[in-house]
Image: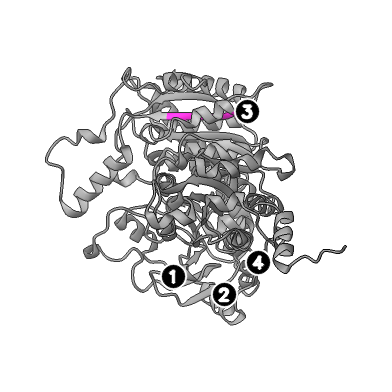
Amino acid sequence: MTTTKLPQQQDVETVAAAGLGRDVIFDYLRNAGVDQMFGVPGTNEVPIIDGTDVTSNLVSYVPCLHENIALGAAMGYARLTGKPGVVELHVTPGAGHAIGNLYNASKSHIPVVVLCGQQHSELLIQEPLLASDLVRTAEQYTKWSYEVRGPDEIGPAMQRALKVALAPPQGPVFLSIPWEFTIQPARDEGEGRVTRIAPGFIGDPAEVEKAARLLSGAPNPVIIVGDGVGAADAWAEVSALADKLVNPRIYSEPLSSFMNYNNADERWKGELPPFQDRMREVFEGCGVAFLCGFNAQAQLVVFNWARGQLIPPGVPLVYLHNDPWQLGKNFYGEAAILGDIKATLPRITALMPEPPTLDDARAEADDTRRREREQRALAVTEAASRSTDGRIPGEAVAVALRKVQDKGLAPNLTLVNEAVSDSGAFQKHLRFDRPTGYFVGQGGSLGYSMPAALGTALADGDRTVVNVVGDGSALFYPQCWWTADKLDLAILFVVLNNQAYKTLLIGLDEIGDSYGWYPTGNAGYLRLPPPPDLDFVQLAAGYGIDGEHVTAADQLEAALTRGLEQVRGSRPRSYVIEVATTADLPPREARTWFDEVVVVP
């Protein structure tokens, strides 16, 4: 007797054969090359986490002790690998805890895919424990946010999420998934395949020609290299265009999340000063400004309209970016090219006439820059050696790290930086071999660097990962040391302990200068208690990480050597060095590294 199956029965069997909703998620992650998932366990996400125990899924679970750590670690992984960073979060508290680094990922254009477990879909109307409108929580800081409405939507949602995260300009996406869908049968005809939008599109030829015409022969030209340049790995292309200009000055955008240009090139003057008057000075008398991949066009805390816009009127502006939002965002552009930066820059350069031959002058200028850096390093070391209070200038740490780097103890350095008030010193003194050799969370939300260092170390074991972090930022997530120890990650953590929120003290000084307002008291809330109340080495030891204190400049090089020998040794392990640094504010005229001013303690 032959039994005829009803269509409904056939559908059920087809769905069952396709696997569970959880399996569909891993089909897409595996095909996208993702091999790490960061998160904090929650009941709703256990089925997804359990999927990392399935060998064929090829994805490992990285346990973290806070959702913002998980998000930050996914950022570091994504930045170094170029793959999506994937993080699972737990309902409303998890999404809320991760907002700081979700914001950083958005501003830094990092492709992160957030999978957030939602409560049971049929219970949501009753407003159950921990539930909320998760999409509204996340959508302001993502390229796309969505709540899946059934198990069969998981496949299309994953395909779109990965496609959107990786499409230029890259950025985070968010999927809320009611937990029961992950353990229900799910249909997916996409077979885990992800659409990849080719990023190398070339800008409009007419606009390219206009840009070349504006740039050619302009006096006192300025190039601002933003994170779009770093993301495109376009150091060489920017350099080739600069070769066609006469005496160009090249600046990075403030708080760059990449190393956006080769710091050994004498034409690079550091980051734009994050202060209104000083930023205007960069553009004064400029014949043309080329804003190339420039995202952070207003990266400062204090602004006063009475002092004028950040770029003075009358400066011709030329834009190039793969993100239309950034073109003419704040200032009118004479030419605005929408195109891939690495692919389009050579088209502009090819249309520009050759300037007078300056090869010998360039080589001499680069050599002069090298000597000036060495002289500066010597002056900083000598000044630090005269300290009598056991506190060291932050720049002395950068100088010592360069000495160790020159000995070959930090090959393939990746510096994850959150010593914000000393950023210029590390940019000036260290050697970087690629844009991703330097990482900052551009949003400015504190607590990104220690988590990002975790993801960076997992992404590429051949890199030497050094995390320099201020004491205020280190207090956000010392739980990172638990993950570092649990996974045997090899990271050198250098905590610059100046017992203060130094960047806030600088900001307060700027408010006083711009508006004449000062706190009524001594602003003791901007200071942190001295040891023994706050001991980062002891704190790290509680998580299983060894370390040491440094209170004299002549101890720095030896301490960094010991730390790197452990990080790069036969049994690589993380190490913590706490350096007692000064909280003294530099003179106002020395608030970018480019000014040759040494602060003597």
Numbered circle sitting on residue 287: 1
Q: Which residues are magenta?
A: 487-495
Q: Is residue 342 visible?
A: yes
Marks 2 and 3: in contact by CB < 8 Å? no
State which mark lies toward you, 3 or 4: 4
Q: Quadrant of residue 424?
A: top left
Q: CA distance from mark 2 to mark 1?
A: 14 Å
Q: Earlier in the sequence, mark 4 or mark 1?
A: 4
Q: CA distance from mark 4 to mark 2?
A: 28 Å
| Residue at figure coordinates x 44%, y 54% from the top left | 123
Numbered circle sitting on residue 197: 4
Q: CA distance from mark 4 to mark 1?
A: 37 Å
* Label 2 element class: helix
Query: Which residue extends farthest left?
Result: 520
- Under mark 4, the amino acid is Ile
Q: CA distance from mark 1 to mark 3?
A: 44 Å
Residue 53 placed where, x, y %?
Answer: 67, 37
